[in-house]
Amino acid sequence: MTRPKTTLFLLGGGGDLSSRLLLPALGQLLTVQPDRQVTLVGVGVDEMTDATWRDVVSASFGTVDASGPAIEALLRDTVFRTADVTSPAALTELLDDAEGTPALYFALPPAVTVKACAALEQVPLPAGTVLALEKPFGTNADSATALNAQLAKLVPENQIHRVDHFLGRSTVFNLLGLRFSNRILEPLWNSEHIESIDIIYDEQLGLEGRAGYYDRAGALVDMIQSHLLQVMALVAMEPPSTLDAADLRDAKGLVLRATRPWGDAPTTSGRRARYTAGTVDGRNYPSYVDEKGVTPSNSTETLAEVTLQVNTWRWAGVPFTLRSGKALGKRRREIVITFKSAKWVPTGFTGGAEPTVLRLFLAPDKMSLSLNINGAGDPHDLERVTFDAEFSPGQFDAYGEVLEGILDNDPSLSVRGDTAEQSWRIVEPILQAWREGLTPLEDYPAGSTGPKNWSPVGIVD
Ligand SMILES: NC(=O)C1=CN([C@@H]2O[C@H](COP(=O)(O)OP(=O)(O)OC[C@H]3O[C@@H](n4cnc5c(N)ncnc54)[C@H](OP(=O)(O)O)[C@@H]3O)[C@@H](O)[C@H]2O)C=CC1
Ligand SMILES: O=C1O[C@H](COP(=O)(O)O)[C@@H](O)[C@H](O)[C@H]1O
């Protein structure tokens, strides 16, 4: 198969995202798929020579041992352009150099991305131009709507990739494959049989010098609005007919449109907390408020939990709890599906009251299914047994899969405009309650599991 030529413009090519995640991912992709014809153009405001840029790209490729003919060709031809991408003239000049289909990756501060998109209105865009936008997509539902309207003036929706690296994970296909190819799962995947679903992404990392962004976002926006709602949509979606972008994204949209804070009570459906000084795995963390660049009066939460309801026949009454936080004692990245207990365990057995639990672990992807079976010895005794399996790790890291989608212009693993808006709509009442101080901001020591008085979410091993 001959692949079409693409010129990938990395706007913000000298930034952290590019050097740490995008360039290594590109290196990985071209190593595995050397038949790709990609010309790379790095763009930034600060001057950089082509030779220095080549060194940047080469160093990033080195982190993943990228090699082969496509890598050599890319390194030979890549150039850096100094340009202010908020200027229509600069953008026009950049695009004049494009060979094949241009893909513009906005690895820029979000406010600059918005201005660049406005500038693009005055730029003749070659047919097929692909736009890839990083999170955060807007700062609330209104700004996300406005940005969508702006983008719609530029290219059709299926040429817009709103990047969510969680959807780049092979996790998406692992989850859909497991759910939809096993007759013992899908018929039980509803409120008749499922008690609750928890989606947990607890990190040991703290702020890591990202106050400029994180102190205005907080855990709810940084992780739940941006990523975990997309994961939830995959868990809760109706069976799609195909894995095509339209089918997958329609099914996700349906779930998110039906999602509300639990009991329609934004004040009580969420909890928030902020870390104080502590130790995580031998590493000392200062209190969040003492981290460089943090404004304590922002009351930014570093741990957020929200419980949501999905108002559909399938999910009525099932709480979906989404939780993510930083500087926690243990890394937990999983989806926990807790089934209802058996309706009746015959008298004569002991045990067996515990429900079936399916745990889907993320990155690396694994699953475990806990059931009750007759244990060794007395056959009346029911004991817990867990079946474990590992999923294939996938060909690429998450950003490799993201880039593959962009270069092939397959938007199935990116966020559609309407669902970006829905994600904001879902969290906004909770954010509002938090801004008004209606939900207390609690504390937890770094290295702990969260505030002492919080009941655990999911399974605590
Ligand atoms: N870093 C990360 O881990 C992640 C980042 N993101 C998102 O990715 C985006 C980029 O983040 P990050 O790489 O960390 O940011 P950085 O601040 O490290 O990089 C931003 C880049 O944008 C360039 N830039 C700024 N203004 C202009 C302009 N007017 N014209 C051309 N270039 C410009 C800068 O150029 P110069 O260097 O020349 O000043 C710089 O290279 C953000 O939206 C962020 O939210 C998302 C997930 C993770
Ligand atoms: O987008 C983000 O994701 C990371 C977590 O994802 P991972 O793939 O690095 O585990 C999170 O740490 C960061 O705060 C957030 O912006």
Image (cartoon, grey):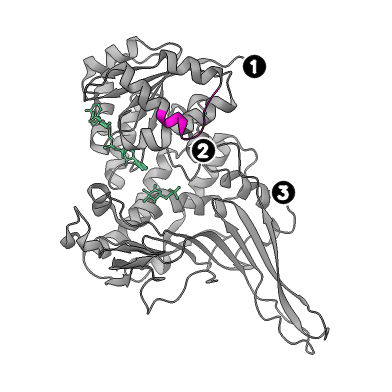
Assess whether residue 62 is covered by the magenta stretch.
yes
Hey, what amino acid is under mark 1?
Answer: Met
Q: Residue at x 33, y 17 (%)?
A: 51
The residue identified by callout 3 is: 181
Q: Position of residue 382 (x, y in %)?
A: 75, 81
Front position in the image: 380 or 147: 380
- Marks 3 and 2, the one that precedes in the sequence: 3
For marks 1 and 2, give the one nearer the viewer: 1
**Where does residue 349 sit, x and y in percent of width and height?**
77, 86
Q: Quadrant of residue 241?
A: top right
The three-letter code of the residue at mark 3 reads Ser
Residue placed under numbered mark 1 in the picture: 1
Residue at mark 1 to residue at mark 3: CA–CA distance? 30 Å
Instruction: Identify residue for label 2.
Output: 413
Q: Residues within 10 Å of mark 3 (few under 14, many from 20)?
A: few
Q: What SS does tag 1 mark? A: loop
Range of magenta residues: 59-67
| Magenta-drawn stretch contains 124 | no
Q: Quadrant of the N terminus?
A: top right
Q: Quadrant of ligand 1?
A: top left
